[in-house]
Amino acid sequence: MADGLLTMNSPQHSDVVIAGGGIGAIVTALQLLDCGLRVTLAERGGRDRFGGLANEAFGGMLFAGTPVQRRNRIADSPELLARDWFHAAEFGADEVWPKKWATAYIERCVPEVHDWLRGRGLKFFPVVHWVERGDFGPGNSVPRYHLLWGTGWHLAQTLIRQLEQHPARARLTLLFQHQVTDLIHEQGRVAGLRCLHDGREVQLRADATVIAAGGINGNLARVREVWDRDCYGEPPALLLNGSDPHSDGALHDRAALIGARVVRLGQMWNYASGVRHPEPRYPDHGLSLIAPRSALWMDGHGRRVGPDPMISGFDTHRLCQRMGRLPGQYGWLLMNRKIFLREMSVSGSHINPHFRDRHLVRAIAEVMLGNARLYDYLTQGCPDVVTAAILPELAQKMQQVAPDVAVDLAGMQADIAAYDGQIARGAAFHDDDQLRRIAQLRLWRGDRARTLRFQPIVDSGAMPLVAVRVMLLSRKSMGGMETDLHSRVLGQDGQPLPGLYAVGEACGFGGGGIAGRRSLEGTFLSCAIFNGRVAARAIAGRADPLVS
């Protein structure tokens, strides 16, 4: 039978049917085949979209106590991760299942995800990165961000290949261009999916149904509906899509109609440094920058944000909060070409081809010598990036990009001069918190390679000047369908809905919000893998007592 088609002889009843084709769905299907079950997977897009957003992810995952951490002389443990996670998450008293999922992941992430991936031939970059350190309290106490060598693209394509070459491949039916429109709910249980394919309805019946169709963040209208105004201010008029329009929350609504508890959709993992994509595939398509630490973060008027400066890599949640309250709800990153070349990066696989294609020498050279390829790509193709030889010319170009908020040239010049003046006086006299943080960042070798040592903005040897307009970018749902530790979707009475399971972003990566209010980063791909494996074993009657 050819994938993507149901013929008269095709089995339309499986042991398990999966809605979605992202990384959670793929892992669930792999594990189910390992358990000997018959699986049908229905993906809304074509074969080229198999793997979902994992294909575009940078591939970072959060673990504690791995061999690569030990080789980097990082002393970490599940106990330390639990302290950091729960502090960042700020779980409420009612978030029982998210706490249970977080505890299970913290205790089991290394054997269940890290070692499982290693056993499937995947490798992690030898340097662990230190992200989400926390602004005024604990974030990640130590480096934990493990980058998959080859990015999320290599992860997705490797697991897809293993799925398609599985010894039990005959038990698997892959259906593309099948848009799931509803759940089949009969006699008090979920009995499969209804799909549209070529304009006709197809019913996919199964003993167990798994929703792995992502979250809501590709639907910007839906994101604005559930926007947390107390946290982020008013829903932004300027909002970029860093997800996929297919992640629209439609199956959340269908599950809710049969009694599923859908919770905390207003808790999202967004980014504060989004720019318009130079090659957009859909409306409002954005890229998420990894903003240079040596750049100055200015408001729409060109004035430096303060009194404590905005700096990436410490508390993304707080950066988004502050961005949502700036004039026009956008900001500017002010830097020069030298800072851009050494420190600017963009999250994603296709924008980092050397890392994606596992060309080690080229990847290292690009870090050490500067990313001229990215500089040319953004300065020539992104409408939010402008360059100039002098500040008055830069301010004029900034004003052309965003004419609704007046750029204060004199104030911008004064703010930059004050910062550059501190650098000129020498490190012994620094009392600017950004400079203090740069000094601290450079103590960790993973950051030292990508962070310049006190680089002024106006520097004749580093020109031209560069200004990048940045805005909020919608990325991940941190809430979703509430699930127990067997990945069963729970009803309003707290009991499992018979026959229905959810994995990945559809369930907030576990329990309807495993990360709480803040992710420590790297918890999305890895948690999707974790609860996909848990769901499959539970469906097959092989639940791990240490997880459940």
Image (cartoon, rainbow, N blue to C red):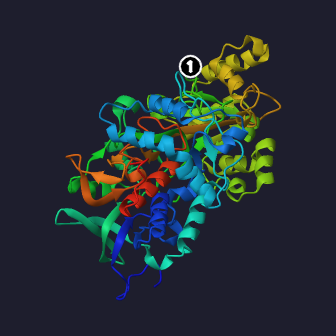
Q: Which residue is mark 1?
A: 308
What is the count of numbered marks?
A: 1
Quarter occupied by residue 258 = bottom left
Can see residue 493? yes
137 lies above or below 372: above
Relative to residue 202, is residue 312 drawn left or right? right
Question: Residue sitting at 42 percent across and 48 percent down?
Answer: 547
User: Residue at the spot x=48%, y=52% of the render?
Assistant: 530
Residue 288 at x, y percent in the picture: 56, 45
> Residue 453 at x, y = what percent?
77, 27
Judge left or right: residue 361 versus residue 292. Answer: right
Q: Is 491 displayed left or right of 147 in the figure?
A: left
Outermost residue to the front: 545
Most extreme residue toward the top is 429
Q: Nearer the viewer, residue 541 or 218?
A: 541
What type is the residue that disc 1 sits on? Asp
| Residue 90 locus on image (x, y percent) | 41, 30
Can residue 213 be seen in the rendering of this structure? no
CA neighbours of label 1 inside 10 A, class few (<14), some (14 to 19), many (20+): few
In this view, the residue farthest toward the right is 461
